[in-house]
Image (cartoon, helix red, strand yellow):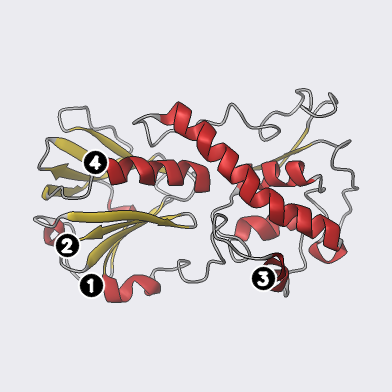
Amino acid sequence: MPEAPELHVAVEFLESCLPGQTITEAQVLRPSVVRSLADPFPEDAVGREFLSISRLGKFLLLALSGDHTLVINPKLTGGIQYVPSKQRVFKRTCVRFALADGNDLRYIDDRQMGQFYYVPNDLIETVPGLAEQGPDVLDDFSFDDFKANLKGFSGEIKGVLTRGRVIAGIGNAYADEILFHAGVYPFKKRRALSDDELRRIHQSSRAVVLDAIGQVRQRMGNQIDHKLRDFLAVHNKGGQPCPQCGNAITELRANQTITSYCRHCQPGMLLKN
């Protein structure tokens, strides 16, 4: 799943090349991902110009002329490509825009789990999940705000973080990294966390993502659909030595989700509910 670091760098790249570009052709190759909330798509998008690119949590927003926006929720396997129009169109390509500069903007999705919305600007907040997000992980929100947003949640802290309602932009991989950086057991219940642990999570969330943005920026280049995470400390590194203590990293899999952590640096006990 692309998370805040990958999407942030993708936005930086797209901001450098998309604004001012006009859509000359639009195709839907995999209709299952497309949601048009008003006007016929893709016909209505042809002739519109890209104005700006932004991110809200795990959503990409591509503003178009004529008060319309493409809102993309890539979920687990979605991504964006900016490639020459002559480049081969793969089966995983769901939506394709030909641009006036001779390049394509393509939405790809191996498993067609993402959602691609074409909406008038006055309907943006009706996109499912967009308005329900908490403050973005890079927003300047206080510790008191963080604690207030946690009220009402009682589950395991990793699950709380990945929901996006307390902090937006964090998924499975970076939740592991944040909790490792904070020294907090990922399965600890939210109500069992001390103020000190909560403060460390609050501080680590921004620090980890900012560091990751720098790492991703160096590795990604123009391949903005790639998830490059070789630099991560613990996620998906089960059995490898912990970078802090040297003990083997523990990896648990449940419901197609990997949780990676260090039993020594993040002590805790997995209890059955």
Residue in front for this viewpoint, 207 or 94? 207
Residue in front for this viewpoint, 140 or 264? 140
Amino acid carrying label 2: it is Ser
Q: Earlier in the sequence, mark 2 or mark 1?
A: 1
Amino acid carrying label 1: it is Ala
Q: Is residue 229 above or below residue 122?
A: above
Nearer the camera: disc 1 or disc 4: 4
- What whole-number distance in Å separates the C-alpha atoms at marks 4 and 3? 36 Å
Q: Which residue is mark 1?
A: 38
Q: Earlier in the sequence, mark 2 or mark 3?
A: 2
Name the secondary structure under disc 3. helix
Mark 4 and mark 3 in contact? Answer it, CB < 8 Å: no
Q: Earlier in the sequence, mark 3 or mark 1?
A: 1
Q: Which residue is mark 3?
A: 145
- What whole-number distance in Å separates the C-alpha atoms at marks 2 and 3? 36 Å
Left-right relation of 60 to 102? right
Q: Which residue is mark 2?
A: 65
Q: Residues within 10 Å of mark 4 (few under 14, many from 20)?
A: few
**Image quadrant assignment for residue 105:** top left
Q: Earlier in the sequence, mark 4 or mark 2?
A: 4
- What whole-number distance in Å separates the C-alpha atoms at marks 4 and 2? 16 Å
Residue 36: x percent and y percent? 26, 65
Left-right relation of 172 to 111? right
